């Protein structure tokens, strides 16, 4: 196939969804441009939403400029309206490559009653960009929420830091307090944020009971910050405080606080991470001048999709047939040939405003092909003739209408293909769950002879070849299930009547109810700078994560058979957060240079898989303030409505194409070290320190490491910055177990006296067989707490505790003195007091 010959075909079909990165905008002359804020279809028309968004972002630009030391601001923002909204005026423009699926910020109702808590969806680790920011319409419109969240402009900056720079929250609702030198502190940054710790479950607020074992406040105790503060940081802790206008830096950061920022970023401050991002690496000069953004209103339009088997000058007029422009139109470019002239099209493609999706058919497609889709925000796919892949079908069903209306998108439930011997069967079961069932299709393809096809529904009804629409020319058969397909197991059996041939089957369906979002899978592939690829599969129902599913990635490689790898949601290795519905795996089984095609299969089991409330990366909901010594409480933070959660989703199945990556010739083959240990824990039991962690692999998360190196220090930052010089913990008797196993040791620390207030910090590295070291683990702290008074109250100050100790000591001395006096007087009639000398 020559790249210069063309065939265009206009399509107007909506297939199924495929995840793409947020646009992320671009930083130009200190200003972020092309920021996209998109409203989800179904949001009711309300011009006040547009006005409020503009006010919030304008305010956010001012706060961003100040928080980044006058270096960046929001310069250009695009607001994308749903197609269903009435056309406003000639000032509304049609989008180019902008879409809801690629937006930086989405405005959408939550599926469940979560309240209006803003959050950012983050897949990756420290310094890695997030997927999108989510605001509800009520958050945008309701002015009363500023009492709980503070300035909405600062909330926007808080979430932008998650999205753009990959930093994390500096509070921790699960661990709100920690021990520091024997006394408890609120988890916060900076420690100069002052306030009261009280239990305000009832009125008036009361002092907190202290757990005698941990030394920490228990029950419903919370930290109520003073309304007026002298500290100006940190926005990633409590953006609601009016004095807080900066990020924590190396001078104000609290490295001891048990929060996600310290865990994910090795106790580094948020500003340290931000200033090392690509936005600030070159010592960007301050911006002097206005920081008011400009806004462009866009409105979605009907989708125009052009299938191109080659390229020609007539392609443009195909695309311009609807309204005379190519902005926002989409091209699916399918090619199997080499062409050195592709790069000559780059400039014209970029100016066209079109989105190009590419499908590389076979290994001979030009290496520059994927650049066309990357520069226009399109998707990349590859298809080969490997018998188990059905890659071409998966590629076409992996294209999405980017308007965000999932109820109208076709969802792939099954996709398989194999070589079937003569007179042999292809049998399997696909589960149609209660969230789908409309427009259900079974599509079968073959190479030479039409097979015999049978489909059994859950009630035993049998559909045979006579119920399929068969097109012998293109060797395809399609069965359409009338109405809403019954939920349950659907069994298919396909008999090959002739000589050996490849047979494939694909099953798709749409949402059963427009008001109930179906279970969906979004796949994201990220290539690491250090080598290797991380596969992310987000399984969700609406915005609710789906937990405990079986998720498997199938990777088709340039040479050798496809490989399968299970993805995990356990918070270990490449996975960031446990049970957040984002299943992750590090892939490094490269077989050579060329294209690697990814597909993900998800299976849910009745009684196991369920939805949950999304956690993490939220703006802080402030419980109240302290002012003039009095606590003024806010309404309690709305809890997620767990009654709306489906404890069981039943059996379901999904298949999703993950796209393609290319490994160019000359890329060095990397031998990967063990993965970083992220769950090291340390506790002190009597006179021993007990440590536990999950074993890494030899090659990242494969096999078993060769050895461990653990070190300890009484200084957290010295251990982090000078690991190799810290005191060594003897682990020579510990042979590393395979990845995922639990490791545990206990020892008596030498040259360290375990007394009240003692803190010992631990970290370790794992080594592989060629002595490559993992990154240093998270730092674990073991603290000694000895209660002075069994029922000490939470508001006791340090001076009160000291006076308590003095009083107790005096009383003990007096009692001992009296006893000795009575004994001596009885014996001799005289007494010399010695007990308290």
Image: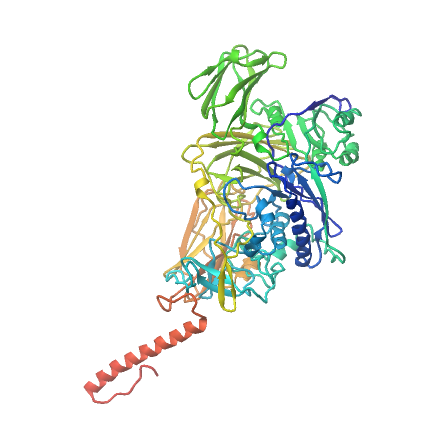
> Considering the image in quadrants, where does the C terminus appear?
bottom left
Residue 827 horizontal side relative to residue 271, left or right: left
**In this view of the protein, which residue sits in the foreground, 109 or 799?**
109
Residue 377's place in the image compared with 761, above or below, is: above
Where is residue 623? Give x, y as percent: 50, 57
- Pick whichever, 138 or 123, lies toward us: 138
Instruction: Judge whether residue 417 can be spotted in this image.
Output: no
- What x and y, as percent, mark residue 824? 23, 85
Residue 243 in percent (x, y) is at: 61, 63
Q: Which coloring applies here? A: rainbow
- Where residue 185 appears, as percent x and y from the top left, is 48, 63
Which quarter of the figure has residue 535?
A: top right
Looking at the rendered structure, the number of numbered marks drawn on it comes to: 0
- Asked whether 699 or 411 is in front, the reply is 411
Examine the rendering and report whether any part of residue 500 can be seen.
Answer: yes
Viewer-side residue, 797 vs 241: 241
271 lies above or below 494: below
Residue at 67% x, 51% y: name it: 55
Question: Which residue ends up furthest to the left in the rendered image?
Answer: 826
Locate the N terminus by quadrant: top right
Task: Please tell me in which quadrant of the rendered image residue 300 appears.
Answer: top right
Answer left or right for 376 relative to 501. right
């Amino acid at each position: 196939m020559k790249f210069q010959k063309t065939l265009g075909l206009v399509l107007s079909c909506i297939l199924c969804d495929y995840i793409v990165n947020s646009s992320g905008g671009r930083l130009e002359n200190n200003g972020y441009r092309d920021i996209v804020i998109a409203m989800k279809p179904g949001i009711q028309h309300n011009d006040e939403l547009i006005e409020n968004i503009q006010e919030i972002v304008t305010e956010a630009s001012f706060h961003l400029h100040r928080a980044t030391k006058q270096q960046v601001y929001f310069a250009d923002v695009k607001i994308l309206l749903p197609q269903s909204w009435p056309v406003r005026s000639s000032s509304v423009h049609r989008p180019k490559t902008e879409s809801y699926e690629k937006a930086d910020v989405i405005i959408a109702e939550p599926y469940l009653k979560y309240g209006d808590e803003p959050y950012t969806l983050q897949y990756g680790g420290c310094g890695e960009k997030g997927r999108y920011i989510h605001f509800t319409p009520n958050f945008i419109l309701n002015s009363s929420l500023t009492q709980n969240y503070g300035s909405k402009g600062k909330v926007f900056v808080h979430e932008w830091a998650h999205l753009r720079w990959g930093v994390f929250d500096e509070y921790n609702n699960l661990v709100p307090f920690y021990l520091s030198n024997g006394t408890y502190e609120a988890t916060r940054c900076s420690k100069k944020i002052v306030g009261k710790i009280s239990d305000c479950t009832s009125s008036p607020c009361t002092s907190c009971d202290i757990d005698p074992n941990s030394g920490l406040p228990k029950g419903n105790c919370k930290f109520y910050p003073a309304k007026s503060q002298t500290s100006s940081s940190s926005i990633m802790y409590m953006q609601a405080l009016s004095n807080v206008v900066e990020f924590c830096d190396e001078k104000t950061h609290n490295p001891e606080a048990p929060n996600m920022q310290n865990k994910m970023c090795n106790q580094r401050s948020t500003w340290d991470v931000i200033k090392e991002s690509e936005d600030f690496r070159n010592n960007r000069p301050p911006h002097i001048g206005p920081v008011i953004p400009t806004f462009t209103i866009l409105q979605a339009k009907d989708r125009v999709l052009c299938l191109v088997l080659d390229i020609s000058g007539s392609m443009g007029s195909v695309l311009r047939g609807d309204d005379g422009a190519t902005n926002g139109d989409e091209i699916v470019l399918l090619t199997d040939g080499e062409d050195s002239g592709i790069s000559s099209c780059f400039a014209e493609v970029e100016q066209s405003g079109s989105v190009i999706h590419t499908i590389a058919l076979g290994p001979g497609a030009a290496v520059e092909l994927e650049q066309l889709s990357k520069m226009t925000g399109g998707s990349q796919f590859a298809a080969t003739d490997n018998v188990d892949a059905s890659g071409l079908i998966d590629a076409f069903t992996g294209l999405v209408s980017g308007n965000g209306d999932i109820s109208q998108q076709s969802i792939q439930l099954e996709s398989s293909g194999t070589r079937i011997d003569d007179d042999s069967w292809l049998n399997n079961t696909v589960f149609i769950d209660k969230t789908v069932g409309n427009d259900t299709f079974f599509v079968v393809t073959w190479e030479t002879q039409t097979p015999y096809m049978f489909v059994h529904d859950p009630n035993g009804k049998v559909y045979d070849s006579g119920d399929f629409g068969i097109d012998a020319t293109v060797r395809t058969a399609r069965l359409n299930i009338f109405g809403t397909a019954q939920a349950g197991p659907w069994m298919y059996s396909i008999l090959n009547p002739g000589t050996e041939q490849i047979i494939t089957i694909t099953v798709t369906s749409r949402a059963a109810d427009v008001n109930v979002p179906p279970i969906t899978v979004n796949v994201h592939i990220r290539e690491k700078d250090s080598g290797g690829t991380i596969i992310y599969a987000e399984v969700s129902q609406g915005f609710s994560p789906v937990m405990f599913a079986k998720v498997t990635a199938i990777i088709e490689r340039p040479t050798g058979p496809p490989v399968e790898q299970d993805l995990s949601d356990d918070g270990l290795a490449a996975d960031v957060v446990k049970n957040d519905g984002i299943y992750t795996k590090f892939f490094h089984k490269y077989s050579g240079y060329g294209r690697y095609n990814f597909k993900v299969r998800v299976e849910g089991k009745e009684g196991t898989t369920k939805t949950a409330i999304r956690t993490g990366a939220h703006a802080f909901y402030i419980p109240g303030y302290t002012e003039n010594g009095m606590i003024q409480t806010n309404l309690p933070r709305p809890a997620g409505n767990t009654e709306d959660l489906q404890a069981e989703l039943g059996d379901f199945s999904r298949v999703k194409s993950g796209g393609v990556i290319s490994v160019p010739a000359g890329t060095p083959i990397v031998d990967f070290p063990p993965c970083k240990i992220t769950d090291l824990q340390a506790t002190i039991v009597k006179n021993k320190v007990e440590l536990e962690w999950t074993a890494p692999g030899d090659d990242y998360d494969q096999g078993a490491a060769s050895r461990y190196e653990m070190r300890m220090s009484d200084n957290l930052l010295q251990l982090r910055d000078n690991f190799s010089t810290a005191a060594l913990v003897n682990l020579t008797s510990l042979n590393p177990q395979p990845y995922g196993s639990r490791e545990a040791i206990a020892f008596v620390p030498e040259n360290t006296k375990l007394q009240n207030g003692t803190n010992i910090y631990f970290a370790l590295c794992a080594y592989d067989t060629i002595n490559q070291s993992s990154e240093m683990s998270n730092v674990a702290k073991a603290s000694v707490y000895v209660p002075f008074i069994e029922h000490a109250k939470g508001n006791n100050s340090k001076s009160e505790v000291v006076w308590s100790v003095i009083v107790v000591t005096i009383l003990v001395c007096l009692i001992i003195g009296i006893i000795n006096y009575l004994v001596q007087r009885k014996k001799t009639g005289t007494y010399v007091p010695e007990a308290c000398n």
